[in-house]
Amino acid sequence: MKELIGSPGTVSGWLLRMGQCLFAAASIGVMVSATGFSNYTAYCYLIASMGLQVLWSFGLACLDVYAWRIKRDLQNPVLVSLFVVGDWVTATLSLAAACSSAGVAVLYAKDLDFCKVPMHLPCNRYQLSIALAFLTWFLIAVSSHVMFWILASV
């Protein structure tokens, strides 16, 4: 079977998972450093979604390292099915969280002018956190696509 870039148990798969984990953690870190984020449900949902993504991606990155150490192939139908479902669930949650947070950020920054001096919300931090969440989602989408094609071939 041809090995795809991002396959589980490979260096590219590990890099993809670590990228997901690091971007999600950065999104959480930036959002938590912004004052008042907990007053907005969409931002709390973003934190929860990115937290789940950190756990999922870090767990699979550890599994990749374990597969390297014992020199084992992770491409069996049961494991790949689990990876596909997990990636699809986390991708859906991450995209929903990023989109809802982006909608709130646009509403506050452009429509209601809450980012001006009187309200002084840290909109730049909110926007940076949301951008990192979208980058996380992009990496999850790549991973989901790769896992789908691997599932079709095993």
Image (spheres, helix red, strand yellow):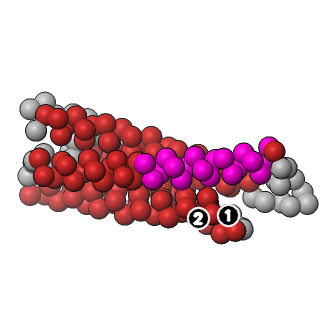
* Residue under the point 34% across and 47% down: 88
Q: Residues within 10 Å of mark 1 (few under 14, many from 20)?
A: few
In the drawing, what numbered circle is on residue 44? Answer: 2
Q: Tell me, yes or no, whether the two marked residues, 2 and 1, touch with CB atoms within 8 Å.
A: yes
Residue 111 in picture, x, y percent from top left: 81, 45
Amino acid type assigned to the residue bearing label 2 in the image: Cys
| Image quarter of the C terminus | top left
Q: Is residue 24 left or right of residue 154?
A: right
Label 1 belongs to which residue? 40
Residue 1 in picture, x, y percent from top left: 9, 32
Region in magenta: 92-110
Viewer-proximal residue among 119 and 21:
119
Q: Is residue 121 above or below residue 133?
A: below
Q: Is residue 38 above or below residue 16?
A: below
Specify whether residue 133 is in view: no
* Residue found at the very far top of the displayed protein: 2
* Residue under the point 47% across and 51% down: 94
